Amino acid sequence: MFFIYGVEDTNFDPGYEPDWAVISTVKRDRVREHPPVKETSQWSFSLPLSELYSLRRSRFSLGRNFLVFTSRGGHPLPPLHFHRGGTRELLRALQHYIILAPSPVDGRLFLAYPHDSGALSQSFDELHLFDDGSSDLVSRFIQDPYATTFGGFSKVTNFFRGALRPPDSPFHSRGPQDHHGPPSADDEPGFELITCGVELGPKPDVTRGQPLDKWEEFLDPEGRVKDPQQIKELVFRGGITPSLRKDVWKFLLGFYPWNSTVKEREDILRMKTDEYFRMKVQWKSVSEEQEMRNSLLRGYRSLIERDVSRTDRHNTFFSGNDNPGLALLNDVLMTYCMFNFDLGYVQGMSDLLAPLLFVTQNEVESFWCLTGFMEMVHQNFEESQEAMKQQLLQLSLLMKALDPELLDYLDSQDSGSLCFCFRWLLIWFKREFSFEDILSLWEVLWTRLPCENFHLLMAASILESQRGEFIGSDHDFNTILKHINELTMKLDLQTVLRGAEANYLQLACCKELPVKVQEVIGLYVPPSPDDETTTETSQSSNSTRLAPMIIPHSKSLGALVLPILTFNGTACFI
């Protein structure tokens, strides 16, 4: 396979893809040589694919993707720019002819190996990663891929630089007048994490059910819920009739245990009421003089008053200047500061409380329902924002699996971080749907079915619904952000819910789903201690299944069939 880059051939029409297409293959001779990079003009070059050492996908700050290829001789080739996307498709095409193994220390970098186990051993040997010889490298890799791979690559790891490079050949981009000039590490700002996608089956059709409209028949004579799981499944499938929400929500949010009797619930309510008012008295009894010396409490009060004055004012329960609903909203949030002083009040929590107060119409019950809700989402409001960063990363993993082309487009427009989804995840789509829709959505999410991260599948469903708007458009980062913000109150909840469940089922049916994605949707089961007693054969089988790359059966190098990869201006042909 030869890599050729040159002036665009205006007569070539790939037909279905403006960036690259498969055009030919060439059978390699058994005798293997190491030809250098051939340059036919200032911006033309060719390289046998067997001499490809690594490739890295990068982007400039303006969002344009480019690939940097490096030969085994340590020579970086000129950056190849993709102004209309297509890099992921190119990577998939390359994998038909070579192994592209993500670097164990940098998922943005791919190391290239031929589909030949002997050549793979030789490649490791040339890098001097294994001091004890590489004659049995492949057998050791199959038996224990993680230990073999990570142990070797640890010798050349520079984690904080985020790269794995030949020592004398840093990647660089070259201008037209400086094709042989000195490299500069600053020429390629902003890298991104990419992985090759998985092949998913068709997205299944999903239907929603009817809302839960009966309650008493699910209780035993003493008032216990006979089958909590059945209740959750019914709620997940269709929500709850408005008249039953006040009762069922208290179970979903942990105010009442599912196995509590009517008598026990009466005792719980009494105890919880006393506890609430004890905490309320704490902040109510603080004098103005004391508060002047308590900047934290003063800050909480000021922030709560400001947020309460603008929370769901369109709803009659909170409308008007002297509405008692606003006073209750303020008091419950101030009392929560006493309940959880470490967290206190953070902007957005008023959005979570308002629907609870509207449904329960009770100060005490809404407070304890809020504490149950905050148990699920309190990390969203922590100052470090680590939980929000993690959720955005998990959403990116889901999109890589579900719609890599859409994510690739967003990447190309400097939107691959999905930061425009921040508000969705922070307050569970509170500003994206109508007030009534939020009541239905939240009770579905509170079931924690089919997984605890169903809200991420919701976000993915919304993004997929906008695919036609984005792909092929001239949107940039600002217009993408504007478009996402303008989706407020324009989304159909039932359509999004069906899409989210279909996403889950589609991923769950994939037999080769990456472990990281399995973890996001709750399918990954970590090995138990008993697994350590399994046979060596079982351990080898399990390790191979989770290995970052698959070693094919040994073949002679001369039998390899390598295509020609041609880069012709903006078009790449294999």
Image (cartoon, grey):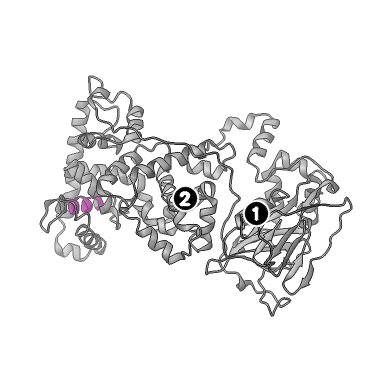
Residue 413 lies, in percent from the top left, at 50, 63
Amino acid type, label 2: Leu
Would residue 563 appear left or right of 285 to someone viewing this image? right
Towards the viewer: 300 or 73: 73
Q: Which residues are magenta?
A: 329-337
To which residue does mark 1 refer? Answer: 91
In the picture of the structure, the residue carrying the numbered disc 2 is 395
Quadrant where the C terminus lies? Answer: bottom right
Farthest front residue in view: 11
Quick one: 333 or 229, which is closer to the camera?
229
Q: Which mark is residue 176?
A: none
Q: In the image as oriented, which residue stretches furthest toward the bottom?
A: 177
Quadrant location of the N terminus in the rendered image: bottom right
Mark toward the viewer: 2 or 1 = 1
The answer to whether any part of residue 275 appears in the image is no
Q: Residue at x 36, y 31 (%)?
A: 233
- Furthest-left residue in view? 322
